[in-house]
Amino acid sequence: MNIIKLAFDNLWYNKTRTILNMILIIVSFVSLMMISGYNNFTKEGIITSINTSGGSLVIADKSYWDKKSEKINMLKDNDFEVIYKKLETINEVNDYQKKLDISGLIGNESKSKFFSGYAYEKPSKIMSSVSLKSGTPIFDDDINTMVLGKDLGEFFNINYDEEPYLNLMTDFGEGISLGSLMAVGLISLNNSASDAITIYCPLNAVYEVFGLEYGDAHNLLIYLKDYKRAEEIKNNLNKYFNENNLNYEAKDWKDLNAFLLSVIDMNTNNYLIALGVLSILVFVSVMQMLTTNFLERLNEFGTMRALGINIKNVTLLLFLEIIIMAVLSSVISIILSYSASAILNASNFIMKFPGATDGYSLSLLLTFKDTVLIFAWVLSVSILAGIYPIIKVIKMPIIEVIKYV
């Protein structure tokens, strides 16, 4: 207990150097917490968006995934019955719905444009994941409605009071199909390229307007209770399909969102780079400060050695000083980090990426795991930085040290 008090007293006596060391550690700790919090927020936002709209798994005929295939086979009612029967045995499945890809030309009497979009069995589930800019959403039971990307709707100068119908020309694999759907709203996918071509409509509307056989769809979106088990369930489903000679294939959300995963990886790499740079900075700076500090205290160490205090206790004292400084710095850093996070989350600070049509409120998602890991990093780097100056002091011959008494 006395040696701990002595360590505190030494830190206080050399408070200028102690405060400088602590400031360096605090700035590094808070910086890593902010970067980590931003990475967590971005990662969770991307993953949640993917699994809410596109599903954790997608099952389709193998021709759907084959880019070289000349014809994509739709799944029929009997195909879905086989798949539904298998899904009923998987407790992790929360919900599922059919999806149909649709693309072609959309226009009115004066102009037309290319479009690409999707028809959903449960469009209300998808509407919850996009931003409705004007008009009304589409519903599961609608048979003649659609929503357009914001820029696509503005291209046609949509006036909802006139119940605007637009003509669509598409091909479902059996030749050109023509039909008209009523635009009831504009949505934003927060991407200017997507907003210029996208349409969403209920699957019932495609059956009704284009005469597509009821029950047909390109794929089945599966929503899991825990998206982290998507790969495991995908492998089990594909094993079942292959063993039973079924021409279906499942892919998980990671397979279908390589670009967004690369964004997550980029943020992770940025964090690791910052961690490496700050590790070197903290290590070198703390080591230099401790070396200078310890050499300036040779009279103190000489007195301790002259009084018969052994090297082991001197070493323990010096390490205790480093540990106490690191722990105090970490506690202050944690308080500052969570306070800054709370202020930022409440400030509604808007960020906007290049190509995005809307910004989003920036938040920091700080986790207990990251806090513990960064604390362990600070403690480890501080202790490692103290090894050299401590060895330098304790290896000095006692005759040399006593000269400073």
Image (cartoon, grey):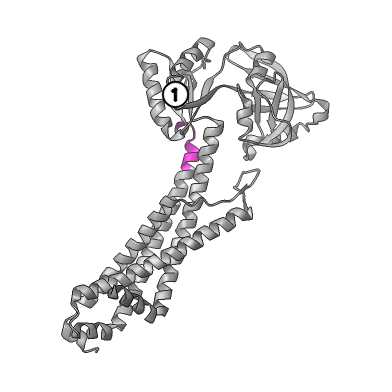
| Front-lying residue, 18 or 2 | 2
Q: Position of residue 43 (x, y in %)?
A: 49, 44
Q: Main secondary structure of the magenta part?
A: helix
Dot 1 falls on a residue whose secondary structure is strand
Q: Position of residue 251 (x, y in %)?
A: 45, 27
Q: Quadrant of the N terminus?
A: bottom left
Q: Quadrant of residue 389?
A: bottom left
Q: Residue at x 37, y 17 (%)?
A: 242
Q: Is residue 17 left or right of residue 152?
A: left
| Front-lying residue, 156 or 299 | 299
Q: How many residues crowd around disc 1 within 10 Å: few (fewer than 14), some, or many (20 or more)?
A: many
Q: Residue at x 69, y 15 (%)?
A: 209
List the single residue furthest toward the front: 1
User: Does 154 sit above or below residue 107?
Assistant: below
Q: Is residue 168 left or right of residue 268?
A: right
Q: Quadrant of the C terminus?
A: bottom left
Is residue 14 visible in the rendered image? The answer is no
Residue that numbered label 1 is attached to: 250
Q: Position of residue 116 (x, y in %)?
A: 62, 27
User: Does 3 sit above or below residue 347?
Assistant: below
Q: Which residues are magenta?
A: 255-262
User: Does 12 sit above or below residue 267?
Assistant: below
| Front-lying residue, 33 or 74 | 33
Residue 25 among those drawn in magenta? no
Amino acid beneath label 1: Ala
Residue 257 among those drawn in magenta? yes
